[in-house]
Amino acid sequence: MGRSVRLQRGGGRPFVHAAAHAFDRVGERAWTLAHWVTCDENSATQAVVAVFGERASDRMIDWDDDATLLREVRSRALAWAPDQLPHGASVVAARIAAMPAAQREVVELAVVGRLAPTTIARSTGASAREVSILLNAGVRELEASAGRRGERLEV
């Protein structure tokens, strides 16, 4: 991770252990996604700790559902994200930030969170077709934006 995030494992509490195991599995992607959304290491860390640390004993979280965990981290990160991207943010980040909310979520979860469209569909409650349409449109928009600047987009 860009920044070290550590979770303390609790003695014998199964949900704390489940959170720590989930963090071991998806922590890198969670922090990367939170950092992508906030463009700030401290805010990204706060978002990750809020989900995997502060809620470690929460029995309502399915610690085996990577998509739901990443969506929760993304949601927390959005709450700490600045109203405007900082100067020097990538053109791709700016284009994604300008997308409609549903499309932005799908693109971020697929591109940054590395989730499959079917997994995103299951997690969001949208149809796989709807997710694919949003993702394809978002990627085409990013490619077109890169092409206008003479760049090649690789996602």
Image (cartoon, rainbow, N blue to C red):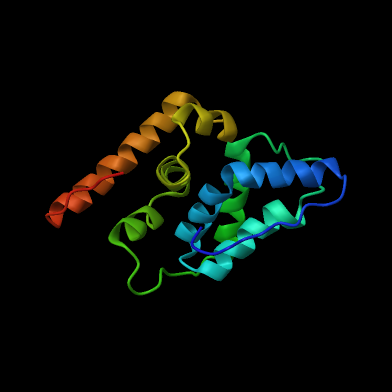
Q: Is residue 44 left or right of residue 99?
A: right
Seen as rendered, the residue at the extreme right is 12
Q: Quadrant of residue 25?
A: top right
Q: Is residue 77 left or right of residue 19?
A: left
Percent x, y for residue 34? 53, 57
Front one among 96 and 51: 51
Q: Using the image, determine if residue 25 lies above or below residue 42.
A: above
Which residue appears at 55% of the width and 59% of the height? 78
Percent x, y for residue 51? 68, 53
Percent x, y for residue 45? 59, 63
Front one among 66 and 137: 66
Which residue appears at 58% of the width and 49% of the height? 27
Which residue appears at 71% of the width and 56% of the height? 7
Which residue appears at 52% of the width and 68% of the height? 41
Front one among 132 and 47: 47
Q: Quadrant of the C terminus?
A: top left
Q: Using the image, determine if residue 42 lies above or below residue 29.
A: below
Percent x, y for residue 11? 87, 50
Seen as rendered, the residue at the extreme left is 150
How many numbered marks, from 0 up? 0
Front one among 4 and 48: 4
Q: Using the image, determine if residue 1 lies above or below residue 133.
A: below
Q: Quadrant of residue 85?
A: bottom left
